[in-house]
């Protein structure tokens, strides 16, 4: 049990906000109810051993488990008051925190152990903040039309295709023609690295992990989905409500990602966004722009939540 009493962060001062027991317990209960609703379909399918080509991505590519997603955290700077809060002292990165209540009286509750957290996660926090700031500073580039998914199956045999249980909407030859007749301009490394060897030379950019901060931009569907990844990688410093907002956005973006893909998902209830047509391109760009706007809001909220961890000039040093 960690009972060291803390007052501020190693990155600077972090204003503490004491939460009365009934207040934070209500937030915790709302979080779990919302998480259960978001997880219900996945957990039911998992019990039956049924795969889902769209939604499983949120639990296979991303490493946060459903049990972790249900866990509510108050975020950096929050102080949980009351006897029930002391159970958190058995959890990693929590400690006793001294704060002041509304009347100015000193109170001791439980909150994030900033010193311990930063000892382990400071490099990650600096990288994430530098990436989020860089992406937020750029305009959204639209018009990639989700061709990264097409490039991932380009010239593959049926047994090589990742979602081999789902047919290709245009067949292998039709899929290859779409790739060859478009300009591929994927800027996101974690999409580009799954391109087939034959498709990689067709991309106008050569994204890498080292150039991620330089190339990621707010119109990219994968950069928007990754807001969820950055939120959970820095839990419990990120409030649970924000984490679920990022998860929900990632889920919605993933749906567009796959509707615009070469796969025929009609049996799963998805209508295609036919990016090989003019109307499909217009539909894709409109949805892409709307997701960029939603992503900008959550990106700003993440930066605000992470501000106590990273001084204003620290992220740019890496």
Image: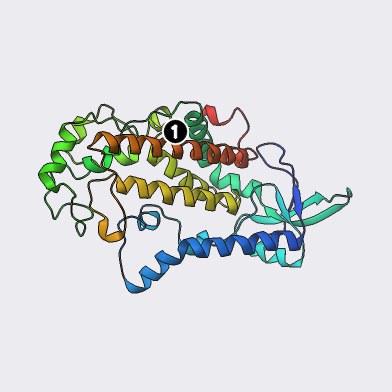
Question: Seen in the image, is 286 located left or right of residue 17?
Answer: left
Q: Nearer the viewer, residue 303 or 297?
A: 297
- Relative to 30, residue 262 above or below: above
- Say which residue appears at 53% left-offset and 35% top-offset: 129
Does dot 1 land on a helix, a strand or a loop?
A: loop
Color encoding of the figure: rainbow
Question: Seen in the image, is 202 located left or right of residue 237?
Answer: left
Q: Position of residue 224 (x, y in %)?
A: 44, 40
Q: Residue furthest bottom?
A: 48
Q: Position of residue 158 (x, y in %)?
A: 13, 53
Q: Nearer the viewer, residue 195 or 297?
A: 297
> From where the camera sits, is residue 128 visible?
yes
Count up the numbered dots: 1
Give the crowd class for mark 1: few <14, some 14-19, many >=20 residues within 10 Å. Answer: many
Q: Position of residue 51 (x, y in %)?
A: 30, 64
Q: In the rendered image, which residue does mark 1 sit on? A: 218
- Relative to 169, residue 211 above or below: above
- Say which residue appears at 23% left-offset and 55% top-offset: 163
- Residue 59, quarter of picture: bottom left
- Residue 146, quarter of picture: top left
> From where the camera sits, is residue 193 visible?
no
Question: Seen in the image, is 16 located left or right of residue 270?
Answer: right
- Residue 28, quarter of picture: bottom right
Image quadrant in which the N terminus is located: bottom right
- Say which residue appears at 16% left-offset and 31% top-offset: 181
Q: Position of residue 306 (x, y in %)?
A: 60, 41
- Relative to 118, residue 163 above or below: below
């Amino acid at each position: 049990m960690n009972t060291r009493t803390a007052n501020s962060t190693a990155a600077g001062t972090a204003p503490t906000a004491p939460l009365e027991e009934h207040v934070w317990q209500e937030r915790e209960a709302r979080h779990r109810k919302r998480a259960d609703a978001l997880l219900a379909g996945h957990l039911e399918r998992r019990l039956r051993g049924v795969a889902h080509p769209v939604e499983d991505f949120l639990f296979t590519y991303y490493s946060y488990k459903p049990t972790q997603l249900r866990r509510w955290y108050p975020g950096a700077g929050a102080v949980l008051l009351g006897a029930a809060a002391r159970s958190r002292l058995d959890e990693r990165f929590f400690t006793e925190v001294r704060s002041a209540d509304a009347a100015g009286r000193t109170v001791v509750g439980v909150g994030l152990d900033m010193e311990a957290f930063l000892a382990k996660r400071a490099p990650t926090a600096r990288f994430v903040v530098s990436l989020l700031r860089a992406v937020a500073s750029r305009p959204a580039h639209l018009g990639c039309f989700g061709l990264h998914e097409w490039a991932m199956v380009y010239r593959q045999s049926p047994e090589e295709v990742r979602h081999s249980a789902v047919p290709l909407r245009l067949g292998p030859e039709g899929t290859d023609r779409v790739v060859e007749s478009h300009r591929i301009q994927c800027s996101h490394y974690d999409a580009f690295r799954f391109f087939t060897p034959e498709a990689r030379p067709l991309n106008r950019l050569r994204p890498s992990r080292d150039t991620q901060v330089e190339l990621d931009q707010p119109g990219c569907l994968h950069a928007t989905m990754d807001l969820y990844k950055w939120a959970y990688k820095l839990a419990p410093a990120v409030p649970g409500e924000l984490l679920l907002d990022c998860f929900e956005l990632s889920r919605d973006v993933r749906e567009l990602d796959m509707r615009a893909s070469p796969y025929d998902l009609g049996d799963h209830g998805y209508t295609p966004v036919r990016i090989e047509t003019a109307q499909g391109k217009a539909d894709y760009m409109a949805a892409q722009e709307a997701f960029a706007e939603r992503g900008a809001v959550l990106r700003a909220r993440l930066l605000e939540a992470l501000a106590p961890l990273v001084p204003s000039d620290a992220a740019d040093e890496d």
